[in-house]
Amino acid sequence: MKDTLTKAYAFNKHIRIYAATTTNLVKTAQAKHYLWPSSAAALGRTLTASAIMAILKDEDLTIKINGNGPIGDVFVDASKNGTVRGYVSEPELFFQYNQGPKKGHINVSNAVGTDGFLYVSRIINNEVFTSTSPLQTGEIADDFTYYFAASEQIPSSVGLGVLVNTDNTIAAAGGFILQVMPDTPNEVLDLVEERIANLKDISQMVNEGYTPEDIIKEISNDDYEILEDNIPLEFKCKCNRERFLNALRLIDQKELDELIKIGHAEAVCHFCNEKYTFDKDELISLKK
């Protein structure tokens, strides 16, 4: 099943819901960065939320989550055309809950930490504007929910899930962002809260074959109106040889001479782990 997003109104247009399946793009991220389960879940949830958010806002966004956990930065670029790319500082993390209702499940909070911030940056008229909110649980979905309430004053609910197989591959991933429209009656709010409280895990739903529309149907109790369907989502990087070659043109001439002596240069993209090698002749051509 391809990764797609669906937009809808629900409960007589009092609620808008954006739901997505993102299994393939999270699989791509996991494979490119060799992610262990907690790192895969943290990046996968952030990729999913960012992809939905960029389409919801119709803006290109940069999302960074920086807590006090060992994962370091979780960094994602999301485009309004449905493409995302991202990385984590530490790809090799695996924590599980040892007790309670989540016993045996992947623990993302331990990897991300709870003392830190979620940053959302956008470019408006060639200027970068960044808004922030403090992390709540480090589980990602709660942190995005709080961001919408604290930084944008929009009552929202964010659901995210990544299911990781025992061999560390990705079984399923997806999510939704639900937002409350102005003047929504209390009885609708109560119904929405009840529906979300009794919702299956998103990753379980996707693993069972739920489409984005099925997720919306489940949340809305079949009271919804599709606005746009089958919007494609994809993990896709913007890097290429020419970009890195242009970057090499900016380095100090002394440093360039050192690379020429070595006989080659190698550059690695943080976002997709793609390696680019430049031979001696290419490096000499950069001399001013």
Image (cartoon, helix red, strand yellow):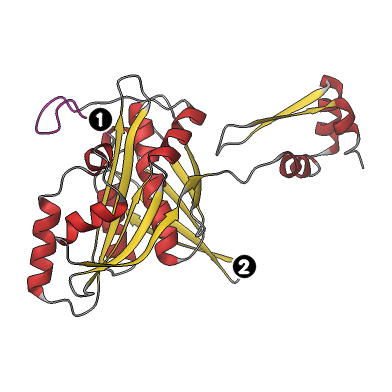
Q: Quadrant of the C terminus?
A: top right
Task: Answer left or right for 240 relative to 32.
Answer: right
Give the residue displayed 17% in from the left and 61% down from the top: 220
Label ID, residue 168: none
* Along the viewing direction, whichever of 15 and 75 lies nearer the viewer: 15
Give the residue displayed 11% in from the left and 52% down from the top: 197
Residue range (magenta)? 97-107
Please tell me which of labels 1 and 2 falls first in the chain.
Answer: 1
**Place of residue 119 in the rendered image (x, y in percent of width and height, measured from the top left):** 42, 54
Where disc 1 sits, the SS reads loop
Q: Quadrant of the N terminus?
A: top left
Residue 188 covered by magenta stretch = no
Cα distance between the residues tagged 1 and 2: 40 Å
**Place of residue 100 in the rendered image (x, y in percent of width and height, measured from the top left):** 9, 31
Label ID, residue 106: 1
- The residue tagged 2 is 126
**Place of residue 64 in the rendered image (x, y in percent of width and height, measured from the top left):** 44, 48
Type of amino acid under label 1:
Ile
